[in-house]
Image (spheres, rainbow, N blue to C red):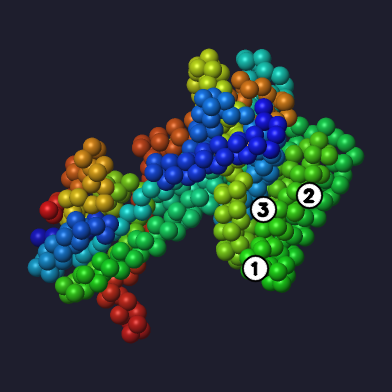
């Protein structure tokens, strides 16, 4: 039923649950599975390129680490996970990523690292559900 | 006013607290440290009656030259060469039309003096490379044609701003000759000597590499001052000339940034904030909106047709990003205030417009005109890695 599955991955417990679920689906449906981590919080309205580059580099290293961890989790479940990084606002970036790369399912944890903000502004999962171009599985 | 050493220490303590607070707030809010420093400086100047001391003014003025040098170092000469025609067209008009628009508007309509109008023109002609770069990274567009053209065009606009600031206010004296000659020698000679110097003296805790750059910048400032000009243009060109070699010495570049961000630029942005008057802002809110409109309208009139021609559907996105401004705008207005060309009201108005141009066009571009997304780093799957290790396709 699903051919291409996208996991929104930020290394949180919620994201790990989502990854596990996605791996199970992937095995059953023989689907291609990707985990994408989003680099958020680049300094807005920076005065120097250096300020952006330093933050970007730190973020890239962190995302690289959690994506390697995601690949290990998937490998233990016999799933060959592909990974990517993108930068931007998390929900918006995941929705656009799914749209532009032809995914037919997004799997996302119910609450990631932004749980406190989520209580006030809605979680990343809420926003993805509202705007996604494909089916969305929210894992609790 | 602060005269004695204990008062200097008291002021230094107050400023140090603001600098620390700015770093923390910047991290928490996700907003650049420059904006937070300007806002805290504004609060300090208006609510706590903080006034910049002579040592702060000196550090701020040196910081502005270091920032200009770093802007030159950040130029990617390869991108500039590869997109030369498009970047000169878009970047050139992006400087020229807003410069003329703001200059003539403030001169004819607002009745500012000729020199004050020129400062307005220069301050509102700018495009912020850093603001543009952050947005391009967030959109994943840094390596696309649109991203490269926008960045290259920004370099050209920056060059126009630096040139205008250095040339428009010259009162020629004989010192102009050594200023020009030494500038040329440094711009040509330093990049040639840099590998030898870094090889022989580099990688020490005493950081001779940073001192070497600082000596050159102080020399430019000294001669620029003697020549009654401004060291912005040669500092920018020196950075540009050293950008290729600095790209090979990433650690040295990072250390220079650390020194600049920790010890110099906070004073520049705090000082700029302290010079903004709340009462001027409230009295001139309408005028701030009008000048913002003048800058953006001139950028649209100039940039959009060329962006449409070279970048097609990304024309609006390009135009809005070329309408941003921050560092060079702050440098220009601060120069105008320090040189007595503009008064505090004009400074407050212009700097607020500059800050608005950092924020508003960026928000609109990201909300309404964002081009398609691209990934920033695709890592191969475990299966691919195994295939690569086995020499497979």
The chain carrying label 3 is B
Mark sitting on residue B239: 3
Residue contact at pointers 2 and 3, CB within 8 angstroms: no
Residue contact at pointers 2 and 1, CB within 8 angstroms: no
Q: Nearer the viewer, mark 2 or mark 1?
A: 1
First reached walking from the N terminus: tag 2 or tag 3: 2
Kindly state the secondary structure of the residue where label 1 is placed: loop
Q: Identify the residue shown where x is 54% and y is 17%.
A: B279
Q: Nearer the viewer, mark 2 or mark 3?
A: 2
Q: Which residue is mark 1?
A: B204
Q: Identify the residue shown where x is 56% and y is 59%.
A: B254
Kindly state the secondary structure of the residue where label 3 is placed: helix
**Whole-Å distance between the Cαs marked 2 and 3?**
14 Å
Counting from the top left corner in percent of width and height, residue B301 is at 53, 30
A16 up-or-down from B39: above or below: below
The chain carrying label 1 is B
| Left or right relative to B13: residue B165 | right
| In the foreground, B306 or B118 | B118
Q: Is residue B161 shown to the viewer in this render?
A: no
**Whole-Å distance between the Cαs marked 2 and 1?**
24 Å
**Mark 3, other Cα within 10 Å: few <14 / some 14–19 / many ≥20:** many
Q: Nearer the viewer, mark 1 or mark 3?
A: 1
**Mark 2, other Cα within 10 Å: few <14 / some 14–19 / many ≥20:** some
Q: Identify the residue shown where x is 48% and y is 37%.
A: B36
Residue contact at pointers 1 and 3, CB within 8 angstroms: no
Q: Identify the residue shown where x is 60% and y is 53%.
A: B259
The chain carrying label 2 is B
**Mark 1, other Cα within 10 Å: few <14 / some 14–19 / many ≥20:** few
Q: Which residue is mark 2?
A: B219
């Amino acid at each position: 039923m699903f051919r291409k599955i996208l996991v929104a991955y930020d290394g949180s417990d919620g994201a790990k649950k989502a990854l596990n679920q996605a791996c199970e689906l992937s095995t059953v449906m023989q689907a291609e599975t990707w985990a994408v981590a989003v680099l958020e919080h680049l300094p807005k309205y920076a005065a120097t390129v250096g300020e952006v580059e330093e933050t970007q580099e730190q973020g890239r290293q962190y995302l690289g680490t959690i994506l390697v961890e995601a690949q290990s989790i998937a490998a233990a479940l016999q799933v060959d996970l592909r990974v990517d990084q993108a930068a931007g606002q998390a929900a918006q970036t995941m929705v656009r990523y799914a749209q532009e790369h032809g995914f037919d399912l997004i799997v996302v944890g119910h609450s990631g690292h932004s749980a406190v903000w989520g209580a006030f502004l809605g979680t990343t999962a809420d926003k993805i559900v509202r705007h996604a171009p494909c089916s969305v599985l929210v894992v609790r | 006013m602060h005269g004695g050493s204990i008062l200097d220490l008291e002021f230094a303590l107050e400023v140090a607290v603001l600098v620390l607070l700015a770093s923390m707030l910047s991290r928490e809010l996700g907003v650049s440290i420059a904006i937070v420093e300007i806002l805290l400086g504004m609060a300090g100047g208006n609510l706590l009656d903080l006034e910049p001391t002579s040592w702060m003014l000196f550090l701020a003025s040196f910081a502005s030259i270091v920032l200009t040098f770093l802007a030159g170092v950040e130029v990617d000469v390869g991108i500039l060469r590869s997109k030369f025609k498009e970047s000169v067209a878009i970047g050139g008009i992006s400087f020229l039309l807003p410069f003329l628009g703001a200059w003539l508007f403030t001169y004819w309509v607002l009745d500012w003096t000729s020199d004050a109008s020129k400062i307005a023109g220069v301050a509102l002609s700018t495009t912020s490379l850093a603001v543009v770069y952050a947005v391009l990274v967030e959109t994943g567009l840094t390596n696309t044609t649109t991203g490269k053209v926008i960045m290259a065009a920004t370099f050209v606009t920056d060059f126009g701003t630096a040139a205008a600031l250095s040339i428009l206010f010259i009162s020629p004296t004989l010192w102009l000759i050594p200023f020009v000659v030494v500038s040329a020698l440094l711009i040509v000679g330093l990049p040639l000597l840099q590998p030898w110097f870094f090889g022989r003296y580099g990688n020490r805790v005493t950081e001779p590499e940073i001192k070497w750059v600082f000596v050159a910048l102080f020399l430019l400032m000294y001669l620029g001052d003697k020549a009654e000009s401004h060291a912005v243009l040669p500092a920018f060109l020196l950075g540009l000339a050293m950008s290729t070699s600095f790209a090979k010495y990433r650690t040295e570049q990072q250390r220079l940034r650390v020194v600049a961000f920790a010890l110099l630029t906070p004073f520049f942005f705090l000082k700029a904030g302290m010079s903004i008057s709340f009462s001027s802002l409230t009295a001139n809110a309408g005028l701030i909106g009008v000048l913002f409109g003048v800058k953006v309208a001139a950028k649209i009139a100039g940039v959009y047709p060329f962006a449409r021609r070279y970048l097609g559907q990304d024309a609006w996105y390009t135009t809005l990003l070329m309408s941003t401004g921050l560092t060079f705008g702050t440098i220009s207005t601060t120069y105008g205030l320090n040189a007595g060309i503009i008064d505090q009201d004009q400074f407050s108005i212009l700097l607020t417009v500059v800050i608005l141009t950092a924020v508003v066009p960026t928000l609109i571009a990201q909300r309404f005109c964002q081009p398609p997304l691209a990934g920033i780093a695709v890592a191969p799957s475990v299966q691919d890695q195994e295939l690569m290790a086995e020499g497979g396709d």
